[in-house]
Image: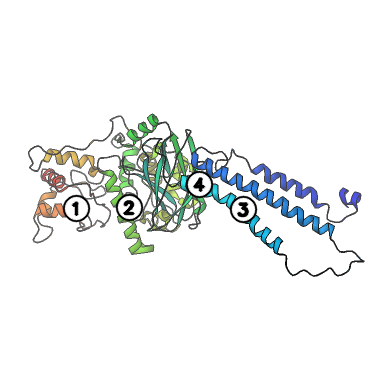
Amino acid sequence: MSLIRSVTGRPGTALIPLILVAFVAILAACTPSHDQSTFDTAGPIAKQQADLFIFIFWVAVAIFILVEGALIYSVFRYRSRPDDKIPRQVHGNTRLEITWTIVPAFVLLAIAVPTVKAIYDHATPPTDRGEPLEIVAIGHQWWFEFRYPSLEIVTANELHIPTDRPIVVTLQSQDVIHSFWIPKLAGKLDMVPLNDNVFWFLAERPGMFYGQCAEFCGVAHAHMRFRVFASPEEEFGQWVTAMRTPPDAPEPDSPAALGRTTFLANCSMCHSVDSYRSGGYGDEIAAQDLRWDTLVEQREESPIVSGPNLTHLATRNALAAGVVPLTEENLLKWIQNPASIKHGTRMQANAAVYKTSNNHVDLTDEELGNVVAYLLSLEPGEGGPAEAIPPSESGEPDAARGEALFAANGCSGCHSLGDDMLVGPGLKGVAVRAATRVTGLSADEYLYQSIREPAAFAAEGYTAGVMLKFPSLTDGDIADLIEYLKTLE
């Protein structure tokens, strides 16, 4: 027999301590210092929403006390007694009915006024806080893509923004309905396929803020996270410059150099690593569109899926859309067996390199280590931002400019200048071979078509679709590239 029951003599009172402990535990969980708390606000929208929530909460508390107080009073005051008689039956009370209609109407009005005001306040960004920065956020199963159209930068799962400046976000989805939510900065808004939503927010203090998909979107929904890094305008400008700066080339025959070749052969169909280059932004958008179209057409059999952009991956804090910290150990585990960190990835379901008996990556330990070394070398180098290659002054095809374009667009990562096969065929004597590939096409025509539409012709022994399009290349650029390729005899 419990101590409480022995004192009171009433059954069930032994549950009271348990209920009190549970109540205290629940209250302990309500801390504003939590990473995704909506009470520790860092921006005007989040603050206004939190204030509105608190106002409605106290209105609800007052109503609860009045209604429950009247109910409890009535239960005890008019409880059944042994000598009770049947009371007079009442079939309506006009005054009472008018009262309980008008009072709730005033309560709703009191709530509606600040709510409607907040809706209008959130409709457009303020005009006195600087020029808004426009960002496109795209939800994928199960990661976030971030595009900066005015800056021509694209990245994934980590959103960098300046403080004290409005951020206007266009929300899109590539597959199913997702929801974009940064609790400390703004409320959630859905990302709906084929239906863009737009909203703005502003960070009033620097720091890292956690974001989350807040709409169930499949098996890995709980692991679809992102992080927001807010920094002063000067630091944000430094980040922009860094994102436009190519990484230093790895030393020949180093693990990173060998890993680059392995990565390009097995991973570059779904992941880009060179969006820092001039024209890289447009090429990445075209590549993502191609990846998605291929997945839609071939469904489960598609060897290509939309993968996160990995440009300057080594500068990021987290891996697998914020699930684990980015470390060498975690990156190795992630590539070897993504399901050990995050279930449901399309990488493991579709990529050819995972078509093994246990769905682990089809790479040796040495190859896997080399790929990790390469990815961890992807950070801004010492050479400064990549610049556009100026057009030829003569207006004629220019082999020297073509050589510069060949290097700037990363062609050497897949094609050697000799007979060696890397990811694609070696280019020694390519102009001679091109002249005999397709009847009726000259070497120039064949090479032009192979660059403009890489899937049009695939050399024997090579898979079509491995080389992605480069829509940023103009016809003049391609003419210069062809002129350079003709020199590789």
Q: Amino acid type of disc 1?
A: Arg
| N-term mark: 4 or 2 | 4
Q: Amino acid type of disc 4?
A: Lys
State how far apart marks 1 and 3 are (Cα).
Answer: 66 Å
Q: Amino acid type of disc 2?
A: Gln
Measured as percent of width and height from the top left, residue 388 is found at 21, 38
Asked whether disc 2 touches disc 3, contact meaning CB atoms under 8 Å apart, the reply is no
Classify mark 1: helix, strand or loop.
helix
Q: Name the residue under label 4.
A: 117
Q: Amino acid type of disc 3?
A: Phe
Q: Is residue 37 among the parts visible in the rendering? A: no
Classify mark 2: helix, strand or loop.
helix
State how far apart marks 2 and 1 are (Cα).
Answer: 17 Å
Residue 452's label in the rendered image is: 1
Residue 106's label in the rendered image is: 3
State how far apart marks 2 and 3 are (Cα).
Answer: 52 Å
State how far apart marks 3 and 4 are (Cα).
Answer: 17 Å
Asked whether disc 2 touches disc 1, contact meaning CB atoms under 8 Å apart, the reply is no
Residue positioned 13% across, 58% down in the render: 437
Residue positioned 76% across, 50% down in the render: 19
Residue 288's label in the rendered image is: 2
| N-term mark: 1 or 4 | 4
